């Protein structure tokens, strides 16, 4: 009786143990499946992240390449713009130069015509003064240059003498500034006449009397250097000594 009871107990324990083992196995299997699923899901996520990263790197490389291309294109456009602006400035300067030349040509024509009118009316001095202000190198027209040179020949020498006489009268009347102006014009127009040393002499004394000693010395030294036979030579030396003492 007792043995049968013990045998039943062992079977109960065996069944319980077997059931526990089965449960453990089932739980272990389930856990392994879950772990495998989790690992697979994690691996998939890693793959997705890697794919996403690769895509990002690809997109970044593409963006960098596109940025470089755009920068190059922008630089090319800037260079083209700079070249266009430089060309535009060059054209502006060329147009400005042409306009200046045209304006100068018109002005020269007008001045020569004015000088010719003064000459026709007998105003030799006025004609010569107008011609004196014209730069003959700026006269491009051959016929106009011939007219200009013709008027110079007709007026400069006579006008020079007239300015000399007027300057001398200014000097005698102690109008020293007017004397300096008229005598200098006489020399500009024609400095080869007999009165050239007279002009420098009266200029020197006029400058001296106005207190401009440096200009007076300049005129006196011109007589010494260029007119050693001048009748004023001794007076020139004396005035230089006086100026040196001032």
Image (cartoon, rainbow, N blue to C red):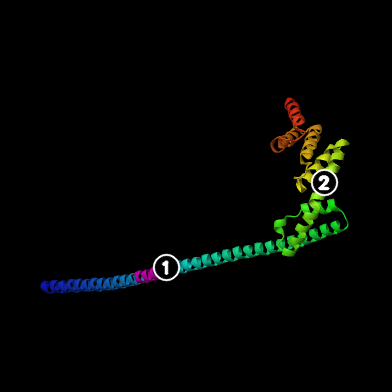
Task: Please say if 158 is above or below 21.
Answer: above
- Quadrant for residue 192, please give it: top right
- Quadrant for residue 1, please give it: bottom left
Task: Please say if 167 is above or below 26.
Answer: above
User: Which residue corresponds to the image point at 86% horizontal and 59% vertical from the top-left?
Assistant: 120
- Quadrant for residue 88, please give it: bottom right
User: Could you tell me residue 45's position as x and y percent?
Assistant: 36, 70
**Mark 2 element type:** helix
User: Could you tell me residue 103's position as x and y percent?
Assistant: 74, 62
**Mark on residue 89?**
none
Which residues, given as a range, are shown in magenta?
A: 46-62
Left or right for 12, reference 197 = left
Mark 1 lies on residue: 61
User: Could you tell me residue 214's position as x and y percent?
Assistant: 73, 34
Q: Nearer the viewer, mark 1 or mark 2?
A: 2
Q: Rate crowding at label 1 as few (under 14), some (14 to 19) or many (20 or more) other CA atoms within 10 Å.
A: few
Tell me whether circle 1 and circle 2 mark residues in contact (CB < 8 Å).
no
> Could you tell me how far apart the alpha carbons at marks 1 and 2 are, in whole angstroms?
91 Å
Left or right for 90, reference 9 = right
User: Could you tell me residue 246's position as x and y percent?
Assistant: 75, 26
Mark 2 lies on residue: 161
Total residue callouts: 2
Asked if the stretch drawn in magenta spans residue 58, the answer is yes
Among numbered discs 1 and 2, the one appearing first in the sequence:
1
Asked if the stretch drawn in magenta spans residue 5, the answer is no
Pick whichever, 210 or 2, lies toward us.
210
**Mark 1 element type:** helix
Q: Rate crowding at label 2 as few (under 14), some (14 to 19) or many (20 or more) other CA atoms within 10 Å.
A: many
Pick whichever, 63 or 145, lies toward us.
145
Left or right for 9, reference 153 = left
């Amino acid at each position: 009786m007792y043995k049968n009871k013990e045998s039943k107990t062992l079977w109960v324990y065996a069944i319980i143990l077997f059931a526990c083992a089965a449960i453990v196995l089932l739980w272990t299997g389930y856990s392994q499946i879950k772990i495998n699923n989790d690992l697979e899901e994690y691996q998939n996520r890693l793959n997705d992240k890697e794919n996403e990263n690769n895509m990002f790197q690809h997109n970044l490389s593409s963006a960098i390449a596109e940025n470089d291309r755009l920068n190059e294109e922008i630089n090319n456009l800037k260079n083209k713009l700079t070249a266009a602006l430089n060309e535009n400035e060059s054209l502006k300067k060329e147009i400005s130069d042409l306009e200046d030349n045209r304006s100068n040509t018109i002005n020269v024509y007008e001045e020569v015509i004015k000088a010719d009118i003064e000459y026709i009316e007998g105003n030799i001095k006025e004609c010569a003064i107008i011609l004196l202000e014209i730069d003959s190198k700026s006269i491009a027209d051959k016929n106009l240059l011939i007219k200009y040179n013709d008027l110079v020949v007709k007026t400069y020498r006579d006008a020079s003498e007239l300015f000399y006489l007027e300057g001398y009268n200014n000097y005698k009347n102690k109008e020293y500034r007017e004397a300096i102006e008229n005598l200098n014009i006489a020399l500009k127009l024609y400095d080869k006449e007999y009165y050239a040393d007279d002009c420098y002499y009266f200029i020197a004394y006029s400058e001296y009397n106005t207190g401009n000693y440096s200009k007076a010395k300049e005129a006196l030294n011109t007589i010494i250097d260029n007119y050693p036979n001048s009748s004023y030579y001794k007076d020139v030396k004396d005035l230089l000594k006086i100026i040196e003492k001032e």
